[in-house]
Image: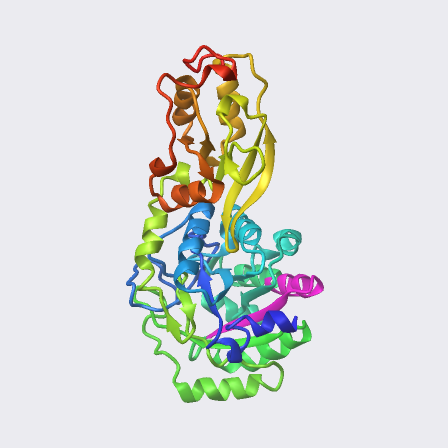
Amino acid sequence: MKANLERHPCFNAEAKGSYGRVHLPVAPECNIRCNYCNRKTDCVNESRPGVSSAILTPMQALAYMDKVLEKESRISVAGIAGPGDPFANPTETLETMRLIKEHYPEMLLCLSSNGLAVPRHLEEIAKIGVSHVTITINAVDPQIGAKIYSWVRDGKVIYRGIKGAELLLERQLQAVEGLKKLGVTVKANVIVVPTVNDHHVEEVAKTLAGLGVDLLNCMAMFPNRETVFEDIPEPEAALMEELRAKAEKYLPQMRHCTRCRADAVGLLGNDRSAELCLSLRECAALPRDLAERPHVAVATVEGLLVNLHLGETEKFQIWSKTAEGFRCIDRREAPEPGSGTKRWENLAELLKDCRAVLVAGVGETPRKVLLDSGIEPVEMNGFIEMGLDAVYSGRSAREFKVRKTGGCAKNFGCSGTGEGC
């Protein structure tokens, strides 16, 4: 717990100058409607929750993570904060967390949610290794909550007024209680809306302290146009400090919040969202097929050199790019020979999560089958890492290539056309 807090800049003010975070915008949907929220517009120079310059798939998020760490090595936290709610897109959220944990095991995983759907996913959150969760709880009195939320959607049913506020509060308290039982560090956000819930903040702090919440963040509402609360002014700094002082009798206070975007990246005091916006959009533009193929298959004898022809490879190594560099993550048995084209179709299915296969040689028929399946056969002789670097950087591997005219060599048991490999 202590080590986690030392490396999380949002949960520990002393870490904000040494460690950074990246928000991966993979969750565009939301299951509640807050009267202060407007996610319709985005300006890259605007810093507020609920906005992002792009939406990523889980595999695109992993590609973006790679680019971020190339430019900012101090990132210690990968989080999802929307731009909707992570658990309005639970599949995308949980798959992204799994991928980040697999490729960057030392990275802290963090989620920020309204809490409505969190109780359904508690076991998955713990299993993946999410260590920090923020739940936004603006009221512990449904009468007040009903003034803040226009509606709450549970599955296909929409609740309004008191019923919606009651359901949301019930789930939020269940989420906090469940997360704490699992050993997750929990921060609560309270969006302070003058004349609506400012008088209620102390009661929120008292209630959440009883549930074991670790930290409270009193956030000033950001007035957004075209919302119910657009004419309510942002609470003044003096009021916010007064409320924090009252709440601090019950819970430690976060005073260094920067009201981050859903695609925020960098240190809290040196956000680089604008600088990395192009990288974010480039990853969002990756062909979905390529983005979902994170690995590269390798035909090798000893795991150091690419030195086997496709037709003679009995077992492929599966390599991936991680924070520690390239590493072999799997080994897969090749399909049995003798079935003609069907063999290569089976191989394409076996390697469907690979963007390329590094081989010393390949016949024309298997080349065509693999290419038609979105897998690039890269012919080369040399070190595996040289080929991997070429594939992942988008460079040509032609400098390592040894191409034999007429398809594969006949000593691999084929006609020379690739048909019988």
Q: Position of residue 420 (x, y in %)?
A: 49, 12
118 vs 229, nearest the viewer = 118
Q: Is residue 75 visible?
A: yes
Residue 419 lies left or right of residue 110; in this view the side is left
Kindly identify the residue that appears in the image at 34 percent across and 55 percent down.
279
Q: Position of residue 222 (x, y in %)?
A: 37, 73
Kindly identify the residue that appears in the image at 54 percent across and 55 percent down.
104
Compared with 135, 320 (above or below) is above
Q: Which scheme is used to colour this image of the protein? A: rainbow
Compared with 139, 118 (above or below) is above
Residue 128 lies left or right of residue 344; in this view the side is right
Q: Position of residue 273 (x, y in %)?
A: 35, 64
Residue 124 lies left or right of residue 70; in this view the side is right
Q: Is residue 154 visible?
A: no
212 vs 366, nearest the viewer = 366
- Specify whether residue 190 is painted magenta: yes
Residue 181 lies left or right of residue 218; in this view the side is right
385 vs 271, nearest the viewer = 385
Residue closest to the far top: 415
153 vs 280, nearest the viewer = 280
Residue closest to the far right: 181
Compared with 391, 100 (above or below) is below
- Specify whether residue 254 is painted magenta: no
Kindly identify the residue that appears in the image at 46 percent across and 14 percent down.
410
In which quadrant will I find the N terminus?
Answer: bottom right
Q: Position of residue 3 (x, y in %)?
A: 62, 71
Q: Which segment did they paint magenta?
A: 172-191
Kindly identify the residue that appears in the image at 51 percent across and 38 percent down.
305
Compared with 221, 121 (above or below) is above
Count of number-bearing discs = 0
